[in-house]
DNA sequence: GGTGAGCGG
């Protein structure tokens, strides 16, 4: 399942994002969206979890959770189609 | 660079 994560602190990186979700289940990959010009975080990212039930549980538990002093927002990612 | 809603390389 693809997961959208927003309101992240700019210093959070893909590896940190992955660790955050790993405490609630298996994480296949995690990616912070970086600005292509500055190379800095855009403040949001995506996480892929192979187990849908763990993914949904992680969304519920990590949404509005405090990470590095910021309250993050976690949702299902939009389908690509 | 930031308070609201956001959906990518």
Image (tube, coloured by chain):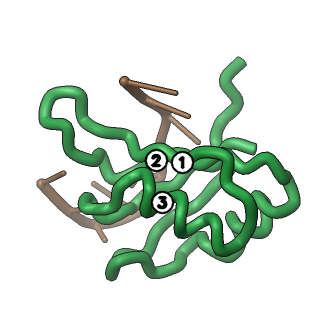
Chain colours: A green, B brown
Name the residue tied to disc 1.
A30
| Circles 1 and 2 in contact, beta carbons < 8 Å | yes
> Does residue A74 lie above or below A71 as drawn?
above
Identify the residue at horizontal 67%, vertical 54% (top origin): A27
Residue situated in front as seen by the camera: A14 or A42: A14
Q: Earlier in the sequence, mark 3 or mark 1?
A: 3
Write down the quadrant of residue A13 in the picture.
bottom left
Relative horizontal placement of residue A11, taking residue A33 as reference (left or right): left
Secondary element under disc 2, as helix, strand or loop, is: strand
In the rendered image, the residue lying farthest to the right is: A53
CA neighbours of label 3 inside 10 A, class few (<14), some (14 to 19), many (20+): many
Q: Are marks 3 and 1 on the same chain?
A: yes
| Circles 2 and 3 in contact, beta carbons < 8 Å | yes
Mark 3 and mark 1: Cα distance apart in space: 6 Å
Name the subunit of mark 1.
A
Name the residue tied to disc 3.
A17
Image location (x, y in percent) of residue A45? 46, 47
Identify the residue at horizontal 67%, vertical 46% (top origin): A28
> Does residue A33 lie above or below A24 as drawn?
above
Mark 1 and mark 2: Cα distance apart in space: 8 Å
| Circles 3 and 1 in contact, beta carbons < 8 Å | yes
Image location (x, y in percent) of residue A7? 39, 61
CA neighbours of label 1 inside 10 A, class few (<14), some (14 to 19), many (20+): many
Q: Are marks 2 and 3 on the same chain?
A: yes
Secondary element under disc 3, as helix, strand or loop, is: helix
Name the residue tied to disc 2.
A45
Relative horizontal placement of residue B7, taking residue A77 as reference (left or right): left
Residue situated in front as seen by the camera: A64 or A52: A52
Question: Which image quarter is the N terminus of chain A in?
Answer: top right
Across the whole image, how many numbered discs are drawn on residues?
A: 3
Image location (x, y in percent) of residue A74? 58, 61
């Amino acid at each position: 399942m693809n997961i959208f994560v927003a309101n992240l602190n700019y210093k959070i990186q893909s590896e940190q994002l992955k660790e955050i979700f790993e405490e609630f289940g298996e994480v296949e990959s995690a990616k912070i969206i970086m600005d292509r010009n500055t190379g800095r975080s855009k403040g949001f990212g995506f996480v892929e979890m192979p187990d849908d039930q763990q993914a949904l549980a992680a969304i519920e538990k990590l949404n509005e959770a405090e990470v590095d002093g910021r309250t993050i927002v976690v949702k299902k990612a939009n389908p690509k189609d």
